[in-house]
Image (cartoon, rainbow, N blue to C red):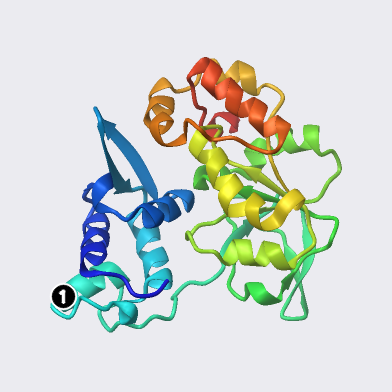
Amino acid sequence: MGVISRTLATQFRRLLAGESVAASALRRDVAEELIAEGLLTVRVHGSHRSFSAIDVAALSLYLSAHYPMLALADCQNLTRSDMAAISGDSKLVSVRACPGFPINSYMPIMCLLAGKKFLVSPMEGSFLFVDDWHSFVIPEDVLVVGIENMENFRMVRRQRYLFDRDFPGRRILFVSRYPRSTDLRQWLKIIPNSYLHFGDFDLEGIKIFLTEFHRHLGDRASFYIPDDIEKRLARGSLDRYNTQYPTCRHLTAPDPRIQNLIDLIHRYHRSLDQEAYIK
């Protein structure tokens, strides 16, 4: 956070308008931050790269929280519509409209919210959203599984076969980073529970885990790798691999299991979306 330039504000405005921006036009540290948050996608055009927003609404929420317009030093000439495009609020209110994160489970889990009992047991076809996450407490034996893609998160019951097989009898709370804020990570840092990251099996997905979760949670965080991943990777996406390779080709991991997954991705030149595991 802090002061940002007119140039950076202009690039934010273009991204929020659904346009692509040249990689050279966006500050490297900002680009890496937004890619790690899962907000930007990288497109390769020969020797040139560009960025575009994956989800404009999510990007708007993130920018309004992390780059409030009151911190802009060189944007006095921006119109109110420019400000609204960047901050999501023409009145320049920097308070986030939707703090917190979604939660889901296919089994009842008794938790605490603001010191009161809170049963997490959403009906099929629904999930819950925790606003007051600072007061959200779960049993210490519950495994927290972070799901990157919203389709997988909504359909946890259609992936129960995976977790019943690999974590028999374990109570599991599924969480999501949508909207793309740091609230989920901050909550994970204050609870003692183990965290399992379930994301895409590609270089960017591994990078998100390493930079956004493992770096902050240490050995409490692990990356979910199903037993049949090699078989599925062999039939994965060549285009996704080629798109990510220029920026992630030197990616390494301290965990041998994750490094083995990286090696498999390079061996087959393929990537796999986690949606492939939805029955």
Q: Residue at x 28, y 84 (%)?
A: 91
Quadrant of image for the N terminus? bottom left
Residue 103 left/right relative to 55: right
Give the residue pinned by disc 1.
Answer: 78
Q: Residue at x 21, y 69 (%)?
A: 6
Quadrant of image for the C terminus? top right
Look at the numbered disc 1 and give the secondary structure of its residue.
Answer: loop
- Locate residue 142, reporting x and y percent: 80, 55
Q: Compared with residue 180, is residue 234 higher up or lower down, i.e. above or below?
A: above
- Locate residue 251, reporting x and y percent: 54, 35
* Of the pair 244 and 201, the residue shown nearer to us: 244
**Is residue 175 something one can see in this rendering?**
no
Q: Compared with residue 4, is residue 173 higher up or lower down, i.e. above or below?
A: above
- Locate residue 250, reporting x and y percent: 50, 32
Residue 217 left/right relative to 33: right
**Is residue 46 something one can see in this rendering?**
yes
Residue type at tag 1: Leu
In which image quadrant can residue 120 be found? bottom right
Q: Compared with residue 36, is residue 257 higher up or lower down, i.e. above or below?
A: above
